Amino acid sequence: MDATLAPQNLDALPAMIWTWSVDFLPRIVTAAVILFIGVVAARWLSRFVLRLAERTTHIDPTVEPVLASAVRYAILILVFLAALSQIGIQTASLLTVLGAAGLAVGPPCRARCRTSPPA
Protein backbone atom coordinates (compact mmCIF):
# COMPACT_ATOMS: atom_id res chain seq x y z
CA MET A 1 0.00 0.00 0.00
CA ASP A 2 2.40 2.64 -1.19
CA ALA A 3 -0.24 4.88 -2.72
CA THR A 4 -0.63 8.29 -1.16
CA LEU A 5 -3.96 9.92 -0.57
CA ALA A 6 -3.87 13.03 -2.69
CA PRO A 7 -7.02 14.66 -4.15
CA GLN A 8 -6.23 13.42 -7.66
CA ASN A 9 -6.16 9.74 -6.60
CA LEU A 10 -9.05 9.58 -4.15
CA ASP A 11 -10.79 7.25 -6.55
CA ALA A 12 -8.22 4.63 -5.50
CA LEU A 13 -9.44 4.80 -1.89
CA PRO A 14 -12.10 2.04 -2.19
CA ALA A 15 -9.56 -0.29 -3.78
CA MET A 16 -7.07 0.49 -1.03
CA ILE A 17 -9.65 -0.17 1.69
CA TRP A 18 -10.69 -3.45 0.06
CA THR A 19 -7.07 -4.59 -0.22
CA TRP A 20 -6.43 -3.67 3.40
CA SER A 21 -9.52 -5.48 4.65
CA VAL A 22 -8.74 -8.63 2.66
CA ASP A 23 -5.20 -8.65 4.05
CA PHE A 24 -5.87 -7.61 7.62
CA LEU A 25 -9.36 -8.82 8.54
CA PRO A 26 -8.45 -12.53 8.86
CA ARG A 27 -5.65 -11.57 11.27
CA ILE A 28 -8.06 -9.57 13.44
CA VAL A 29 -10.59 -12.41 13.49
CA THR A 30 -7.89 -14.91 14.41
CA ALA A 31 -6.63 -12.62 17.18
CA ALA A 32 -10.18 -12.29 18.54
CA VAL A 33 -10.57 -16.07 18.57
CA ILE A 34 -7.22 -16.40 20.37
CA LEU A 35 -8.35 -13.85 22.96
CA PHE A 36 -11.71 -15.55 23.50
CA ILE A 37 -10.22 -19.02 23.92
CA GLY A 38 -7.45 -17.63 26.12
CA VAL A 39 -9.83 -15.83 28.46
CA VAL A 40 -11.97 -18.94 28.83
CA ALA A 41 -8.89 -21.11 29.41
CA ALA A 42 -7.45 -18.66 31.95
CA ARG A 43 -10.69 -18.61 33.90
CA TRP A 44 -10.95 -22.41 33.83
CA LEU A 45 -7.32 -22.98 34.87
CA SER A 46 -7.60 -20.37 37.62
CA ARG A 47 -10.59 -22.18 39.09
CA PHE A 48 -8.78 -25.51 38.73
CA VAL A 49 -5.73 -24.20 40.59
CA LEU A 50 -7.94 -22.72 43.31
CA ARG A 51 -9.78 -26.03 43.83
CA LEU A 52 -6.51 -27.94 43.81
CA ALA A 53 -5.00 -25.56 46.36
CA GLU A 54 -8.08 -25.83 48.56
CA ARG A 55 -7.78 -29.62 48.62
CA THR A 56 -4.10 -29.48 49.49
CA THR A 57 -3.33 -29.13 53.18
CA HIS A 58 0.18 -27.73 52.67
CA ILE A 59 -0.96 -24.37 51.28
CA ASP A 60 -2.10 -21.53 53.52
CA PRO A 61 -5.72 -20.51 52.77
CA THR A 62 -4.70 -16.87 52.32
CA VAL A 63 -2.31 -17.82 49.52
CA GLU A 64 -4.85 -19.84 47.54
CA PRO A 65 -6.62 -16.92 45.80
CA VAL A 66 -3.30 -15.20 45.16
CA LEU A 67 -1.98 -18.33 43.47
CA ALA A 68 -5.13 -18.65 41.35
CA SER A 69 -4.93 -14.99 40.34
CA ALA A 70 -1.26 -15.32 39.43
CA VAL A 71 -2.05 -18.26 37.16
CA ARG A 72 -4.95 -16.41 35.56
CA TYR A 73 -3.04 -13.22 34.84
CA ALA A 74 0.05 -15.05 33.61
CA ILE A 75 -2.11 -16.88 31.08
CA LEU A 76 -3.91 -13.67 30.10
CA ILE A 77 -0.59 -11.89 29.49
CA LEU A 78 0.63 -14.72 27.27
CA VAL A 79 -2.66 -14.81 25.37
CA PHE A 80 -2.59 -11.04 24.88
CA LEU A 81 0.96 -11.25 23.53
CA ALA A 82 -0.05 -14.09 21.18
CA ALA A 83 -2.97 -12.02 19.87
CA LEU A 84 -0.72 -8.99 19.31
CA SER A 85 1.76 -11.17 17.50
CA GLN A 86 -1.02 -12.56 15.31
CA ILE A 87 -2.02 -9.05 14.28
CA GLY A 88 1.56 -8.32 13.33
CA ILE A 89 2.83 -6.26 16.25
CA GLN A 90 6.37 -7.08 17.34
CA THR A 91 6.22 -8.38 20.90
CA ALA A 92 9.93 -8.80 21.66
CA SER A 93 10.15 -5.44 23.43
CA LEU A 94 7.02 -6.21 25.47
CA LEU A 95 8.55 -9.50 26.59
CA THR A 96 11.71 -7.65 27.57
CA VAL A 97 9.71 -5.21 29.70
CA LEU A 98 7.83 -8.07 31.37
CA GLY A 99 11.10 -9.84 32.13
CA ALA A 100 12.60 -6.69 33.61
CA ALA A 101 9.48 -6.18 35.71
CA GLY A 102 9.80 -9.72 37.02
CA LEU A 103 13.42 -9.10 37.94
CA ALA A 104 12.49 -5.83 39.64
CA VAL A 105 9.61 -7.27 41.66
CA GLY A 106 10.95 -10.74 42.48
CA PRO A 107 13.80 -10.02 44.93
CA PRO A 108 11.88 -7.48 47.06
CA CYS A 109 8.96 -9.91 47.36
CA ARG A 110 11.29 -12.70 48.37
CA ALA A 111 12.97 -10.49 50.96
CA ARG A 112 9.57 -9.42 52.29
CA CYS A 113 8.43 -13.03 52.61
CA ARG A 114 11.57 -13.91 54.58
CA THR A 115 11.15 -11.08 57.07
CA SER A 116 7.40 -11.38 57.60
CA PRO A 117 6.38 -13.08 60.84
CA PRO A 118 4.62 -16.44 60.54
CA ALA A 119 0.85 -16.39 60.84
Image (cartoon, grey):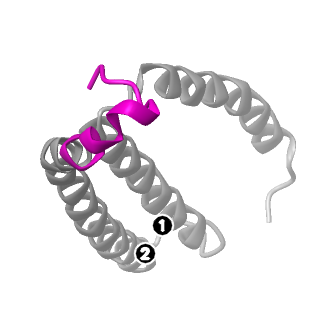
Name the foreground residue: 31 vs 20: 20
Crowd tier of the residue under label 2, counting other residues whose Cα lies within 10 Å: few below 14, some 14–19, many 20 or above:
many
> Is 29 situated left or right of 54 in this image?
left
Q: Quadrant of residue 106?
A: top right
Percent position of residue 54, x then y: 44, 79
Q: Was residue 9 drawn as part of the magenta stretch in this picture?
A: yes
Query: Which residue occupies 18% across, 49% down?
Result: 18
Let me know if residue 37 is in the magenta part.
no
Instruction: Identify the residue under disc 2.
Output: 50
Work out whether 113 lies above or below 65: above
Rendering coords of residue 50 (x, y %): 43, 75
User: Residue 68 bears which disc, if any?
Assistant: 1
Q: Is 61 on the left-hand or right-hand side of 51?
A: right
Q: Which residues are magenta?
A: 1-16
- Badge 1 marks a residue whose secondary structure is helix
Q: Position of residue 32 (x, y in %)?
A: 27, 62
User: Which of the image's four quarters has the C terminus?
Assistant: bottom right
Residue occupying the point 52% across, 56% down: 70
Residue in the foreground of this view, choosing between 101 and 60: 101
Q: How many marks?
A: 2
- Dot 1 amino acid type: Ala
> In which quadrant of the rendered view does residue 38 lie?
bottom left
Q: Is residue 5 above or below residue 45?
A: above
Residue 69 located left or right of residue 83: right
Where on the picture, by quarter, is residue 53? Answer: bottom left
The amino acid on which the numbered mark 2 sits, given as a three-letter code, is: Leu
